[in-house]
Structures are given as structure tokens and as C-alpha cells.
Image: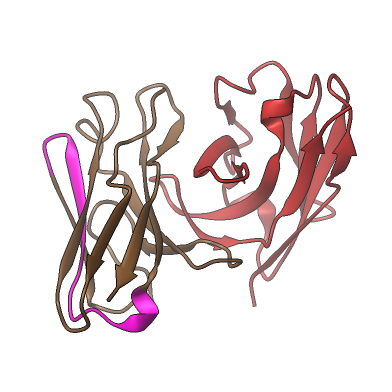
């Protein structure tokens, strides 16, 4: 059974850093593309970042230069390193697995909450 | 990258059909057949309902269908059921190698 479990969220001050993890099971992270999507309170879904099976990475303009997506194939885990955090980064962060080449996602985790506040 | 445009809400009665639109531009919906639709019940993870404009993942009811014309993609739900009440989001790959979501549509089953 495919499962994705996020962790690492929490309360962080503006300007701080936080590292999110997404532990995958039931499939191999190295052979699928994976993404992070977030949802701020009262807002819709916002795409954050994606890593291809080949290792290429992509970012939303809002996080480019501040966030880094990566994966550890040995741990079958996806990561999101977040730095220079802003109030507008506060959201529930979800990881998801890609289904086809069209950047669509068939399995999602339950999310981890990131709160940015002083 | 601006969000795709969806109606804030739609409604329908059980047994009826409804359509949710998703309007983009030449940089996303208009130029790529990589439009997806997600269903989101409160407190649950999004569920992929349609991908690549009109394909249904395994297990998704054939009451859900997708299409595209020009810059606008559409999700149609036929024979509406109470369990279809949820938020629906469209997404599209873009020419900037990014992904953009719509603002979401709240479907109410009357």
C-alpha cells in the first residue's frame, strides 16, 4: 500500500529555517516524481516544489532561492529544506506522488503544519 | 504565475449534472494537455479525479469526466450524489515548468 507521511512542521520565527520530511512506503521515491503542495488557512492549494525521478528540481517563484527539495533514496524519503521563512509561508504542507508525466499526483500525505510567527 | 480561475461555488441536486470551469492562459491550460482535477473533502487529503484533461485514475467513478476547449478546462459530474459535496481544484502544468492550481470550487449538493 502506498503511504506518505510528513513530519517536521512546527512553530518558527520569521527568518528561521525548518526541514520537512516525507517518509514514503509502498513505492520507491527514486522512480517517481514527488512534489510539495501547501495550503494556507482559508486559502486554496499552492504548488511549492517538485523533484523528478531523474533528480531535476523545480520551484514556485514564491519559494525559489529559499526552499530546497531533495530525496534520500536509501531512506525512501523526500525532504523540503525551508529557510528565510515568512509569515506567508505558514500553511499545511503536503507531499504527493506523481502519476504521469503531466505533473498530477495520485497519492498524498496527511500534511504537516508550519506556523511562522514571532 | 497567476492562479487558474474557477467559480467559487456551484450547486446541484442529486441526480443532476454540474460542470466546473477552470480558465487559464496560453502559458498553461491553452498550451498543455496536462490539466488535472482534485476532490477535497474537509480534513482529507486531495484525491486525483481527472488527469491529462480527460483521463480517470483507476477507481474513480465514470460519473466524473474532463474536457478542454481553448484556455478553459471543465470537470463534469453527472448523476450527482451527496458524497460528491466537496471542494474541487484544477491544476495545470505551465510553460515556466511550474504547476498552477485554481482557487478551488465548493460544490454543494442540495
Indicate whether A47 appears above or below A98: above
Picture quadrant of residue B79: bottom left
Q: Colour of chain A?
A: red
Judging from the image, what is the letter of the chain drawn in brown?
B
Could one spot residue A72 in this view of the protein? no
Residue at 84% of width from left, 52% of height from top?
A: A74
In the picture, which quadrant includes the N terminus of chain A? bottom right
Indicate whether B55 appears above or below A51: below
Q: B24 and A59: which one is in front?
A: B24
Q: Is residue A9 left or right of residue A110?
A: right
Which residue is at the far top? Answer: A65
Q: B65 and B104: which one is in front?
A: B104
Which residue is at the far front? Answer: B110
In the picture, which quadrant includes the C terminus of chain A? top right
Q: B66 and A90: which one is in front?
A: A90
Could one spot residue B95 in this view of the protein? yes
Horizontal and vertical percent position of residue B93: 37, 36
Q: Is residue B32 left or right of residue A65?
A: left
Total residue callouts: 0
Residue at 76% of width from left, 49% of height from top?
A: A113
Residue at 55% of width from left, 66% of height from top?
A: B42
Residue at 65% of width from left, 51% of height from top?
A: A95
Magenta span: B69-84
Picture quadrant of residue A3: bottom right
Horizontal and vertical percent position of residue A22: 76, 53
Amino acid at each position: 500500500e502506498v503511504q506518505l507521511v510528513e513530519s517536521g512542521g512546527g512553530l518558527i520565527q520569521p527568518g528561521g529555517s525548518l526541514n520537512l520530511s516525507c517518509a514514503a512506503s509502498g513505492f520507491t521515491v527514486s522512480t517517481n516524481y514527488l512534489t510539495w503542495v501547501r495550503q494556507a488557512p482559508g486559502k486554496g492549494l499552492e504548488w511549492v516544489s517538485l523533484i523528478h525521478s531523474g533528480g531535476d528540481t523545480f520551484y514556485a517563484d514564491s519559494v525559489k532561492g529559499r526552499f530546497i527539495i531533495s530525496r534520500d533514496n536509501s531512506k525512501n524519503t523526500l525532504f523540503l529544506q525551508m529557510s528565510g521563512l515568512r509569515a506567508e509561508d505558514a500553511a499545511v504542507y503536503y507531499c504527493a506522488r506523481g502519476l504521469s508525466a503531466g505533473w498530477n499526483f495520485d497519492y498524498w500525505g496527511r500534511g504537516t503544519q508550519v506556523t511562522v510567527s514571532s | 504565475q497567476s492562479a487558474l480561475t474557477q467559480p467559487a461555488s456551484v450547486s446541484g441536486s442529486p441526480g443532476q449534472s454540474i460542470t466546473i470551469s477552470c480558465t487559464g492562459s496560453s502559458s498553461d491550460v491553452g498550451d498543455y494537455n496536462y490539466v488535472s482535477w482534485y476532490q477535497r473533502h474537509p480534513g482529507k487529503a486531495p484525491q486525483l479525479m481527472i488527469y491529462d484533461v480527460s483521463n480517470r485514475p483507476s477507481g474513480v467513478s465514470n460519473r466524473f469526466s474532463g474536457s478542454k476547449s481553448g484556455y478553459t478546462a471543465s470537470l463534469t459530474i453527472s448523476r450527482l450524489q451527496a458524497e460528491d459535496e466537496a471542494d474541487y481544484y484544477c491544476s495545470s502544468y505551465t510553460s515556466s515548468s511550474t504547476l498552477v492550481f485554481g482557487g478551488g470550487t465548493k460544490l454543494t449538493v442540495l
